[in-house]
Image (cartoon, rainbow, N blue to C red):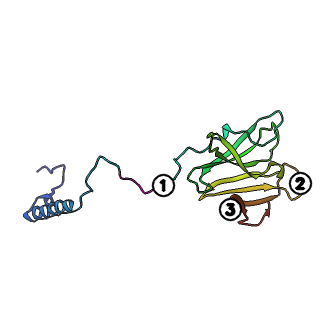
Amino acid sequence: MQHPAVPDLSHTHTRPIHWVATATALAAVVALSSVLQPDAATAAQSAAPSPRNAPAQTAPPDPAAVTFPLECGPVQAVVQKKASGDLDGDGRPETVAVVHCDAPMGTPPDGVYVITHDTDAGKPRVVATLVDPKDRKTVTDFSVHDGAVLATLLGYSSTDVPSCCPDVTDDAKWQWKNGTFVRDTPSQARTV
C-alpha cells in the first residue's frame, strides 16, 4: 500500500456545526455594519470654526531673501541652520536662522536672528537678534518648539580662551512675552 504525500486531514471535513457558526458570524457582521454607518456624504465641506480676523496661512520667511546685520568683510554670510514656527501667536510662522560669516579657516561666531514677513510688502525682514556674533557664541543644538526657540551655546569664560576651544556651555530658551523676546535660563552655564 502506498502512503499519500499529504497526511490525512480528517479534521477539515465540514460538519453542520461549522455551517451554523459561519452563518452566525456572518449575520453578526451584517447586523453590526448596518448599525455603524458613516455620515451621509455631501458635496460641501464643513466649515471649521476659526477666528474672524485670522490671517491666511503663509509660508515661513526664507532666510535667503534677507540681508543679515552681520559684517563679514569680503566673505558672505551663511545660514547654518534654520527652523520655523509661530513664535508670537499671530497665526503666521516666523523663521529663526543661525548665521555666520563663511570664513575660510576657524569657527566664526554665530548670530541667531528672527525673520518675519513685512506686513505691507510681504518681504521677509529681521525683527530680532537673539545672539549677537560679537558675543563669540557658537550654536550647536537648535530648534523651535511650542513657540519657543531653544539652543545650546558654546562660549568662552574669558577673552584669554582661544577661539578654537570654547570652555562654557549654556542652554538658552527665548519666548515672545509682552512684545519682545525674553530669554529664560533653563539651566546654569556649565564649563566643558
Q: Quadrant of residue 153?
A: bottom right
Q: Which residue lies most toward the left here?
A: 16
Q: Residues within 10 Å of mark 3 (few under 14, many from 20)?
A: few
Q: Which residues are magenta?
A: 46-50
The residue positioned 52% from the left and 47% from the top of the image is 57
- Judging depth in this view, the residue of 91 and 11 nearest the camera is 91
Q: Quadrant of residue 67?
A: top right
- Judging depth in this view, the residue of 143 and 18 nearest the camera is 143
Query: Label 2: which residue?
Result: 161
**What amino acid is labelled 3 in the image?**
Asn
Q: Give coordinates of residue 171: x percent, y percent.
A: 72, 60
The residue positioned 68% from the left and 54% from the top of the image is 141
Q: Give coordinates of residue 55: x percent, y percent.
A: 53, 49
Q: CA distance from mark 3 to mark 1?
A: 23 Å
Q: Which mark is nearer the camera, 3 or 2?
A: 3
Q: Label 1's element?
A: loop
Query: Label 3: which residue?
Result: 178
